Amino acid sequence: MHVIILGSAAGGGVPQWNCGCPNCTAARRDRRSRTQSSVAVSADGQRWVLLNASPDLRTQLAQNRALWPRGARGSPVEAVVLTDGEIDHTLGLLLLRESAVRLPVYAPAGVTALLADEWPLYRVLSAYSGVEPRALEEGQPAALTDRAGVPLGLCCAATAVARRPPRYAHGTPAGTFDVGLRIEDEQSGGVLAYVPTAGTVDDAVRRTAREADLLLFDGTFWSDDELRAAGAEAPTAREMGHLPVGGPGGSLALLPGIGAKQTVLVHINNTNPILAPGSPERAQVEAAGIVVGEDSMEFEL
Ligand code: MLT
Ligand code: MN
Ligand code: ZN
């Protein structure tokens, strides 16, 4: 399985348009940026699946050669899998509206309900290329298929992770809002565990990550009060459903025991000090054998 981290940042990206924190300031000065959260996977290197659809999808598709059109028109993107209904994981669907065919979008039931109603992407897109909603049912691993229904050689299992619904969701339809994915290459046996948002390391996360060749895990915040310390009116990391990386009970203490062969942090917020090379927090992550994800990082599983 080929895996590309398309975007390693959390919502807002780096730099975030209205943020003057040290990381955003350095990113503007050095013209280095990180795009918002998304991953691409493929078994055959020809047909690709996006894991979440980032607001920066246009840039991401342009920057990664594997995702360029093969001919005069068309795209190797065959399907999208959504882990949640957050804006930073779904807005990119709007950017695919020029598609000639309906785009298959796998999502948990709660997310499909949100995108048909409170965040009405599917309704809006129906006037353009449209999407073909496909169910991602918990406890029922699915063989992902391309636009024509041909198997992609990837089996995807979704497990609900502990998190609240998105902030815009008021009607709270029934169903799961947030899942971790365990994707297995049916030929190589390689396993990717993708958990970009997690409020805790519990049995659901452990089941998703067990013996995975690669775990891509929620690296949003270093500390619980990070956003407030950066001057933003905001809830804590835990209130937002993101387990902090540092501190007592943080993911840095828990992830090394989880059984994944390699762990890389993704969905990293611009305020997170692990983004600063040379910071003590970055050194702690590296000392634990965990990698700070970067845009365009590639893996073969
Ligand atoms: C999250 O990951 O908690 C959300 O994407 C936050 C947001 O609204 O940007
Ligand atoms: Mn997010
Ligand atoms: Zn910032």
Image: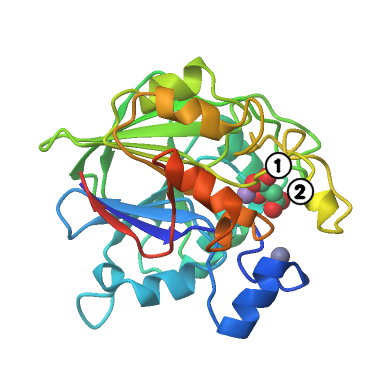
Under circle 1, the secondary element is: loop
175 over 68 or under it: above or below: above
Amino acid carrying mark 2 in the image: Glu
Q: Residue 121's quadrant in the figure? A: bottom right
The spot of residue 92 in percent (x, y) is 53, 62
Residue located at (53% from left, 77% from top): 32
261 over 126 or under it: above or below: above
235 over 275 or under it: above or below: above
- Residue indicated by mark 2: 226
**Closest to the observer: 110 or 246?**
246
Residue located at (22% from left, 57% from top): 47
- Cα distance in 3D space between marks 1 and 2: 5 Å
Amino acid carrying mark 1 in the image: Ser
Q: Are dots 1 and 2 in contact, CB under 8 Å?
A: yes
Residue located at (26% from left, 36% from top): 213
Q: Residue furthest toward the top?
A: 203
User: Can residue 98 be seen?
Assistant: no
User: Can residue 99 be seen?
Assistant: yes
Residue located at (52% from left, 44% from top): 284
Under circle 2, the secondary element is: helix
Q: Residue furthest toward the left?
A: 187
- Residue indicated by mark 1: 223
Q: How many circles with numbers are drawn on the protein?
A: 2
Q: Is residue 145 left or right of residue 164?
A: left
**Closest to the observer: 149 or 191?**
191
The spot of residue 272 in percent (x, y) is 65, 54
Dividing the image into 4 quarters, which one contains the C terminus? top left
Q: Is residue 228 left or right of residue 13?
A: right
Queried on whether the Cβ of the residue with tag 1 lies below 8 angstroms from ligand 3, the answer reads: no
**Closest to the observer: 56 or 195?**
195
Question: Residue 191 shows which numbered tag?
Answer: none
